Amino acid sequence: MKRVHVLFSGIAVALMSAYAAPSSAQTVALAADRAGTTFNTIGSGVAVVAKKYGGLNIIVRPYAGPAAWVPVLNSGEVKLGVMSANSAYQAFSGDNEQKTAYTDLRLIRAGSATLMLGFLVRKEGPIKTYADLKGKRISSDFGGHLSIANSLTASLKVAGYTWKDVTSVPVAGANDGIEALVANRLDATWASLGQPQAREADTQIGVRYLSIPDSPDAAAIYQEIVFPGARITIAKANAAPGVEAPTRLLSYDSYIVANKDASGAMIAKLLDGLWKGTDDLLPIHPSMRGYTHDAAVTDAPVIPYHPAAIAFYKEKGMWTEADQKRQDELLAQAKK
């Protein structure tokens, strides 16, 4: 690819200030997951930096998950959103719960391998490896997050199991799975590295992320079941609560996205603010560390870039002929 709690309180305070900004300033809504999730934190961080460096007021609008907000962003009711490349792939390709291709989504900035995910278990519990998952209670369903359900199915396959080898426990979302883990209603759930709810769970019960088995087939299984851009990345020791040693986790890019007809001037203002404020953006959350300048234009996009984003990156000398070729291919796919 080309490319504690005090901090979160600071984001909240900054957002309150943004809401109180003069009415003459431009305000735009950004769709994200519910409070306490990784993507809500990412969206809140984007809002803070965009306001500070770009003068753009962003109101983060929480939803149950991408399945809930992608239709309204695709229609133009909401102009911006934050999501994983996995969810973007499902939305754009039509490989989703609605069986609908949302082809009016556009990428405006990418973060390289920013999202790292895996099984979260009790630190002092009996589950130490993927092999120990057999017969255990595993979170399932995850309404609004097909990407999580697929990730769990792939992870069980990597372990040599299927859903028949475990006890599935339906949950409504990522936070609900962690709450059920804390309440001892299940034994393992899916969580992103640095997820606020996972950090809180660590203070309550102590948690640990399971390391993906070092199998030659693991990456291929994730790419087949989750999406082609999935890969395995090693999280460094102490990268976040629950990671005491180098840990192999599933990873993929995360995106800031827009509707294809979103104002070019608004997007230019947003990108300029994020570009100038990148040093403030990176420390907000572990999943923001890949939002470097070099990663803004990914060499493996799964949705087309917005024209205003292309113009911005051309000015920065980052948009290449290869990028334009990939753009043309994705636009052709959108017309099918």
Image (cartoon, rainbow, N blue to C red):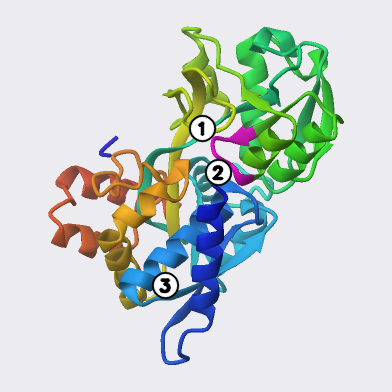
For residue 205, side relative to residue 287 (left or right): right
Name above or below for residue 327 compared with residue 165: below
Name above or below for residue 171 compared with residue 226: below
Q: Which residue is mark 2?
A: 90
Q: Residues within 10 Å of mark 3 (few under 14, many from 20)?
A: some
Name above or below for residue 49 compared with residue 225: below
Q: Give the residue displayed 54% in from the left and 18% down from the top.
A: 221
Decide: marks 1, 2 in contact (CB < 8 A)? yes
Depth check, front residue: 179 or 303: 179
Q: Which residues are magenta?
A: 191-196
Q: Give the residue displayed 52% in from the left and 45% down from the top.
A: 93
In 3D space, how far apart are the residues under numbered discs 3 and 1 (Cα atoms)? 27 Å
Marked residue nearer the N-terminal end (1 or 2): 2
Depth check, front residue: 83 or 52: 52
Residue 305: percent from the left, percent from the top?
34, 56
Q: Residues within 10 Å of mark 1 (few under 14, many from 20)?
A: many
Marked residue nearer the N-terminal end (3 or 1): 1
**Mark 3: amino acid:** Ala
Q: In the picture, which quadrant includes the N terminus?
A: top left
For residue 105, side relative to residue 75 (left or right): left
Q: Is residue 229 magenta?
A: no
Q: Which residue is mark 1?
A: 227
Q: Which residue is mark 3?
A: 262
